[in-house]
Image (tube, helix red, strand yellow):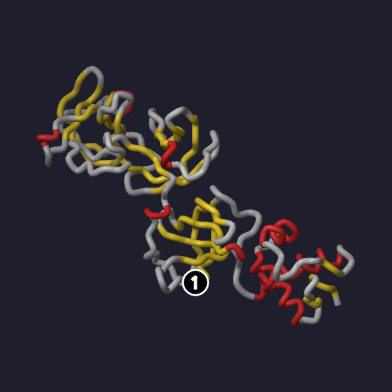
Amino acid sequence: MEANHSNLPFKIGQTQTLQVDHLSKIGAFLADPERPEAGTVLLPKKEGGSGLSAGEALSVFVYLDSEDRPIATTRQPKIEMGQMRPLTVVSVTKIGAFLDWGLEKDLLLPFHEQTVRVQIGKEYLVALYLDKTGRPCATMKVYERLKADAPYKVGDWVHGYVYNINPNVGAFVAVDYQYHGLIPRQDMNRDIHIATHVRARVSQVRNRDHRLILSPHKQGYKMINTDGAVVMRKLKAAGGFLPYGDKTPPAVIGREFGLSKGAFKRAIGHLQKRGKLRIGKDGIHLL
């Protein structure tokens, strides 16, 4: 559960510039000169709080320690508020999973914020939020956090991360960890699965919501020829007939040819036009 934490003395889960107020045996106490009423936050020596001088300004990340007290560090975390990043699961407990986010205290991913059952050692795309106590936590519910106003046009190549797959729809992709992207099921291949990084071409910017429709394949005759060569090799090796066609499930096409359903259909259509094969109701026939 997320809540409004605008009244917190420091920006929890964010990097900010603070000033050394005073020094102690355990580290430096930092303050915001623009908000002196907020008090101070400790920057322990082991977190970069040694060798400093009073009045010195530095950039620090503020989060909560094991006793839920604000604490600062000069370490750069792998994720901050307002960001989405893939993080690795390091342990699973009764209250949820814990993720490595580059700080001494691991980041909690509560069970109710998980969209799939997570496994130790695997990474998952998450966003950072503050729970009702003000503690930074992770959530896998990133769909509603992605934006639809991506600065890309048809033909652009983009980088993304597959965070979910619906067999009836396709692969849901976080482009630049910020924008909605979708690889339709007919364009998926066996290399696309949850938690994979992909490079794909924008094939369409959907009119109704400006979301990106993506294709992991190159455009044009070169890719068709390459895919066609794969089909022809398989067809010749099978003796001139293969029982695959328009009604064959995408997963079967991917397993047998290593192609998406869309790429397979384009390839066999091109080969039929060239007189290399015939597409029948029962499959494809070598000519």
Residue 63, image quadrant: top left
Side (left or right) of 192 relative to 38 = right
282 versus 96 height, above or below: below
Label 1 sits on residue: 204
Q: How many marks?
A: 1
Under tag 1, what secondary structure?
A: strand
Which residue sits furthest right?
239
Q: Residue 279, located in which quarter of the rendered image?
A: bottom right
Q: State the image coordinates of residue 52 (x, y, percent, origin top left).
A: 23, 28
Counting from the top left corner in percent of width and height, residue 6 is at 19, 43
The local crowd at label 1, few if under 14, some if 14 to 19, many if 20 or more residues have their Cα within 10 Å, is some
In the displayed structure image, the side of residue 236 where residue 230 appears, left or right: left
245 horizontally vs 14: left or right:
right
> Height in image: 219 above or below 255?
below
> Does residue 76 sit above or below 179 in this rendering?
above
Q: Please provide percent x and percent y for residue 221.
A: 66, 75
Residue at left offset 79%, top offset 70%: 283
> Where is the C terminus found, in terms of image quarters?
bottom right
Q: Residue furthest left?
A: 37
Q: 45 and 5: which one is in front?
A: 5
Residue located 55% across and 54% down the image: 165
Q: Amino acid at mark 1?
A: Gln
Q: Residue at x 71, y 65 (%)?
A: 248
* Image quadrant containing the N terminus: top left
User: At 52% from the left edge and 40% from the top edge, which residue is drawn?
Assistant: 117
Left or right: residue 15 versus residue 259 is left
Picture coordinates of residue 189 (x, y %)?
A: 64, 59
